[in-house]
């Protein structure tokens, strides 16, 4: 089986496993499925959960699309023509409780061809997983990072530090001088090179994807019973505003999708359900809210 | 007095007049003022209203900034070096009632210099005013357009049709295939050219600014007592999401400001206070909500 076929199978299988576990921990809502086709070739399976016991809104999307390279991608890759195959699993979960962090993860594979049906002339893996808490529990953040560190270290000890740094660098609201969340891992353009061939990155990417549930579910369990009220909810909704700012202003994936005719509702399922923007809100010095901002302005290693 | 001085005086005076009238129609909240300085030169006077009787959130910003051209502007204007002076009045009002439309207006003047303190080598006016209803009352939309048509026609009969078309074109969420609102007027790069010199555009711009209150306040008065409930509020919050999408993904002014080190809280005061994103919400065919969408997908002339 080709890497493309094998990874595509993994995507749909991982989507099933992840949705089943999330439904079980949510305890009340189920995922609704939308199958969609892309005009230029391929399609996807979007699964959305709303108004659950834990998850106010979330989506787990699987897609495998192919065809001629859209104009904007040709421009970016500096090629006059070309064909592509792109497949990936992408998820975002927005819990209702401000004590449970929002989480995002994405695992993807891309192949480029000079001619339709030809051999791939370039291919790479990308992905990552990152945590966006509203109230900081160090135990949670350490557990999340340690889980992915263990997976990465198993493949090569250099990977985790590199991916963690890339994560803090990528998920950065430059106009605010703040990271979106507390980090995790981020990688892109993992190609055959030197001692690491594509199979190596294939294994690493699926291993990270398979670790997602064990990285995140314990955090949900630890924080489910944590009390919160209007003040915490207010701060969560304000911070969700920063999440929107990142996704709409800076996120390459979102803008790429919107600019290349992706399915808008599947791309923007990443946006939080209820959000606020109030003018110039500054948390009290020494408060838990101020504590979070300090960490976002000066990313930590956590492991 | 130079055009620059005269227009700057107008900006601060218009801000005073507009804020006074808005406070009076709001009846409960007052504007809070923030004076700010820009590191590279100049500054502004931001005025914010929140949790009012009519206005849930709004801002009326005056600013006059100058200095060396920021890197991104140099790139855009294709010049290696240069100095600028930019001044403008910018306002956005988000009423609490879904029956009263959101309104935005902006009036600005820009001068470019080859050397610090030199003569202007280029200068232009820009601006506009546009309406974003959540529930469509044709009377309101016609009144808004007619008010600006009268002002524009007084200067030249060609202007209004051109500015209205530019407005529908500019405030367009291309990824949604919808305009942000129902239009109004939009103009940019109004320079000395042929029979129209800069004074002509100066007069037109201030005349449009001076017409803002008579274009918008009657609409507030007509709709203040219109009943609404949770369903209308829900739709308003969803549509406010589209407003955010436009401002953060497409609006040149917002991205320009954020990318050139503008004051973030003054730029993003344009974002609505409470917003929702639910997955793939489609209004019932024939409903008032569906009626609005139709108009946004196929802009009308209104006058």
Image (cartoon, coloured by chain):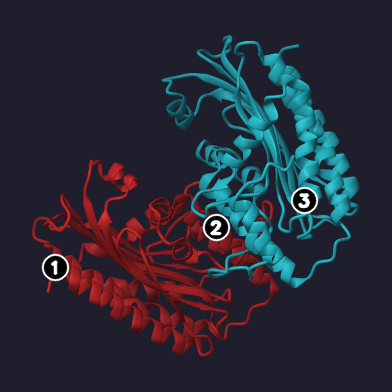
Chain colours: A cyan, B red
Of the two numbered discs 1 and 3 in the rendering, the one whose residue sits closer to the viewer: 3
Would residue B287 be visible to someone looking at this image?
no
CA separation in Å, label 2 and label 3: 36 Å
The chain ID associated with circle 3 is A
Q: Residue at left 91%, top 46%?
A: A24
Judged left or right of residue B136, residue B35 is: left
Q: Residue at left 50%, top 39%?
A: A259
Same chain for mark 2 and mark 1? The answer is yes
Q: Position of residue B254 (x, y in %)?
A: 42, 56
Q: Position of residue B86 (x, y in %)?
A: 27, 61
Of A268 and B155, nearer the camera is A268
CA separation in Å, label 1 and label 3: 62 Å
User: Circle 3 — which element?
Assistant: helix
The chain ID associated with circle 1 is B
Residue corresponding to mark 1: B199
Residue corresponding to mark 2: B242
């Amino acid at each position: 089986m080709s890497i493309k076929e094998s990874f595509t199978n993994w995507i749909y299988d991982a989507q099933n496993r992840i949705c089943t576990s999330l439904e079980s921990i949510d305890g009340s809502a189920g995922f609704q499925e939308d199958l969609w086709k892309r005009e230029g070739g391929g399609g996807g399976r979007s699964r959305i959960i709303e108004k659950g016991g834990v998850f106010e809104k979330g989506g787990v999307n699987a897609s495998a699309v192919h065809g001629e390279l859209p104009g904007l991608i040709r421009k970016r890759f500096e090629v006059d023509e070309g064909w592509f195959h792109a497949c990936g699993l992408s998820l975002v979960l927005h819990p209702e409780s401000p004590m449970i962090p929002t989480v995002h993860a994405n695992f993807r594979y891309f192949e480029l061809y000079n001619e339709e049906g030809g051999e791939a002339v370039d291919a790479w893996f990308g992905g990552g997983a990152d945590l966006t808490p509203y109230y900081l529990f160090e135990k949670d953040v350490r557990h999340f990072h340690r889980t992915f560190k263990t997976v990465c270290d198993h493949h090569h000890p250099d990977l985790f530090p590199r991916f963690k740094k890339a994560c803090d660098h990528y998920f950065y609201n430059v106009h605010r001088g703040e990271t979106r969340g507390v980090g995790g891992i981020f990688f892109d353009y993992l190609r055959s090179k030197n001692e690491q061939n594509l199979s190596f990155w294939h294994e690493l990417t699926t291993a990270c994807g398979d670790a997602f549930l064990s990285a995140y579910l314990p955090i949900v369990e630890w924080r489910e019973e944590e009390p919160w009220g209007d003040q915490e909810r207010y701060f969560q909704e304000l911070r969700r505003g920063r999440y929107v700012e990142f996704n709409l202003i800076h996120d390459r994936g979102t803008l790429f999708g919107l600019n290349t005719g992706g399915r808008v509702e599947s791309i923007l399922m990443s946006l939080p359900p209820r959000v606020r923007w109030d003018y110039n809100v500054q948390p009290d010095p020494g408060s838990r809210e101020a504590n979070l901002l300090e960490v976002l302005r000066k990313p930590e290693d956590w492991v």
